[in-house]
Every structure is written in structure tokens, then in C-alpha cells.
Amino acid sequence: MNELEQVLDFFNGIGISYQLQPLPASGFLPGVLIKNGTLLIDPEQLSYPGDLLHEAGHIAVMPEASRHLLNDNVNESANQGPAEEMAAIAWSWAALVHLNLPPQFLFHPAGYKGGSDSYIEAFTANSGFGHPMLSWYGMCKPAGTEAGYPQMNLWLRP
């Protein structure tokens, strides 16, 4: 099973909705778009499959009742701000750890505004950010506690 199939299998298991389909060439991230709370994925255009984990994180941290409001620009479509961005990044790290994939799969050099190495360093040292939000949402126990973050109790916010 390749990494993309592994990620999609994970999405199937936790209930992240996605569709494989051709997408327009212009988009925020090549080969991935959120539409009405569903990930639209164009495998032909997808440059970095790890981007799917981050975008799925935006869906996962939204309350269930309002996930359908998420569209391409999550800040504009569902009023997600810095807290949700950090929670989505922390969620994507937890997913990466769960899938046993290398840090560079998620934090690739072309992403995160040049901060990928810093993110890898922070999350590898268990000093990453955003996980207190996941704990507050009831999705995991606090980091540093038994069975705490990055282990998740819920992959989707209720």
C-alpha cells in the first residue's frame, strides 16, 4: 500500500469524507480542495499527499454540525482562524504518528511558509503547538499524560 492509499484508508476508517476527481489547475493546494466539508482529491495533480492530512485536520476540528460549511478558504467559508489552524496542524501530526509516516511526509519543504524544519523539530520534541485545542475539544488527553496527545481518543470533533 502506497502512502496515498494509506491516508485514504485512514480517512475511510475515521469518517473523513473525500472524493477522487479531476480538479481545476488553479487552487490553494495542487490536487486538493475542500468543498462543503468534503475533500476533493485529484491524484494526478497532488504534489504532496501529506497536504491531505493538513486539510483533513481542518475538517476534523470543526464541530460536526458545521463541517459542511467548510470550503476552499476555511478562514472565509467557516471563520476558522489561528486557533483552528494550529489545531489542524496538531491533528495532522497525530495522524502522521498514527500512520507511522516520516515527518517530511507532512512537513515537506514546499509547505508551511518555509517553517517545515522548525515544525518537525518542535513536534518531534513533543513541544509542538495546537494540541491544547484538541484536548479542549475533547479529542485527546493532554500531552504528557498517560495516553495523551499525540494519541487521539476521537479523530472527529463531535
Image (tube, rainbow, N blue to C red):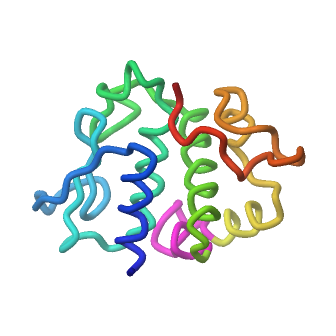
User: Is 85 positioned to the left or the right of 151 in the image?
Assistant: left
Across and down, in percent, residue 155 comes to 54, 42
Q: Is residue 113 magenta?
A: yes
Instruction: Classify 61 as above or below 31.
Output: above
Residue 83 placement, left or right of 12: right
Question: Picture coordinates of residue 28 (x, y %)?
Answer: 30, 53
Nearer-the-camera pick, 62 or 128:
62
The answer to which quarter of the image holds residue 101 is: bottom right
Q: Which residues are magenta?
A: 103-116
Q: Is residue 116 left or right of residue 111?
A: right
What is the quadrant of residue 9 in the picture?
bottom left
Q: Point out the residue furthest to the bottom here.
A: 2
Q: Residue furthest front?
A: 13
Q: Which residue does the image show at 61% across and 42% down from the upper left? A: 86
> Is 24 located above or below residue 107 in the figure?
above
Give percent across and percent down for residue 107: 56, 68
Residue at point 43%, 52% (across, down): 13
Q: Name the residue nearer the viewer: 89 or 37.
A: 37
The answer to which image quadrant residue 71 occupies is top left
How far across and how far down the image is residue 72, in percent? Answer: 28, 41
Give the residue at the far right of this rendering: 145
Name the residue rendered at 81%, 48% in the picture: 147
Residue 119 in the image: above or below residue 147: below
Residue at (61, 72) in percent of width and height:
100
For this view, does 28 lie left or right of residue 92?
A: left
In the picture, which quadrant includes the N terminus?
bottom left
The number of numbered discs placed on residues in the rendered structure image is 0
